[in-house]
Amino acid sequence: MLNRIRDLAWPRMGLRRYGTYLRKRVMRLSASPHAIAAGVASGAAVSMFPLIGLHFFLGFVLAFATRGNMIAAAIGTAWGNPVTFPFFFAAAYAVGDWLRGGGGVSAAESEQLATTGAQLSDGLFSGGFEAILPTFTTMMLGGLPIAVVVYGAFYIVVRTVVTRFRAMRQARMAERRGMAQQS
């Protein structure tokens, strides 16, 4: 039982090996560099939103809209995980608060947070969705510009890496063919 719980948060093979596995899976996809990059970028971008449980679906929708690869989108959603979500959500809230003209937590927001904290002790939705709606909308608003930046960064990096990987692979294959013809 304890191993199953551990496997949900930490891959059995270790994070470095898991990252290498995902990188190789992306490199070996049989799609164009654009499709792979758009797919991975879509998955990573939707991970910025506080919609846990919908990231795969949203990644597929965004990948479809940008003509990205669906498998690459699923792999890209691995960017959002239990280790990174607190950082993403804190950044989304901070950006959303800044976009709304906030300067941190005001006295009214402090009272709202205290009320929400009391309601959360009884259960997340015991006070209704209205209890968390201000925080949720702030995080959604802040997640949007972050997602755009993440999409752009992942697209550029992944497309560059995939293009270089394929060029090196073709050069190795041409070299092997040349050596085979000489024999």
Image (tube, grey):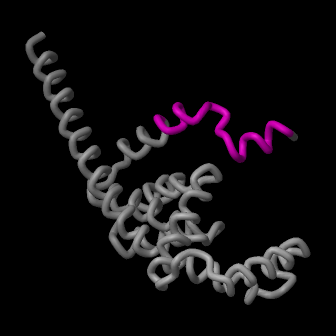
Residue at screen point 8% across, 13% down: 182
Q: Nearer the viewer, residue 86 or 107?
A: 107
On whether residue 13 falls in the magenta region, the answer is: yes
Kindly indicate the quadrant of the structure image that contains residue 87. Answer: bottom right
Q: Is residue 91 left or right of residue 85?
A: left
Q: Nearer the viewer, residue 156 or 183?
A: 156
Most distant residue in the right direction = 122
Is 183 situated above or below 145? Answer: above
Kindly indicate the quadrant of the structure image that contains residue 168. Answer: top left
Residue 17 x/y as whole percent? 53, 31
Q: Nearer the viewer, residue 118 or 163?
A: 118
Residue 105 x/y as whole percent? 62, 77
Residue at screen point 52% across, 70% down: 94
Total numbered badges shown on the rendered structure: 0
Q: Is residue 64 left or right of residue 54?
A: left
Is 3 situated above or below 78? Answer: above
Residue 146 x/y as whole percent? 42, 68
Q: Which residues are magenta?
A: 2-20
Residue at screen point 79% across, 42% down: 4
Q: Is residue 179 left or right of residue 55?
A: left
- Picture quarter with the N terminus: top right
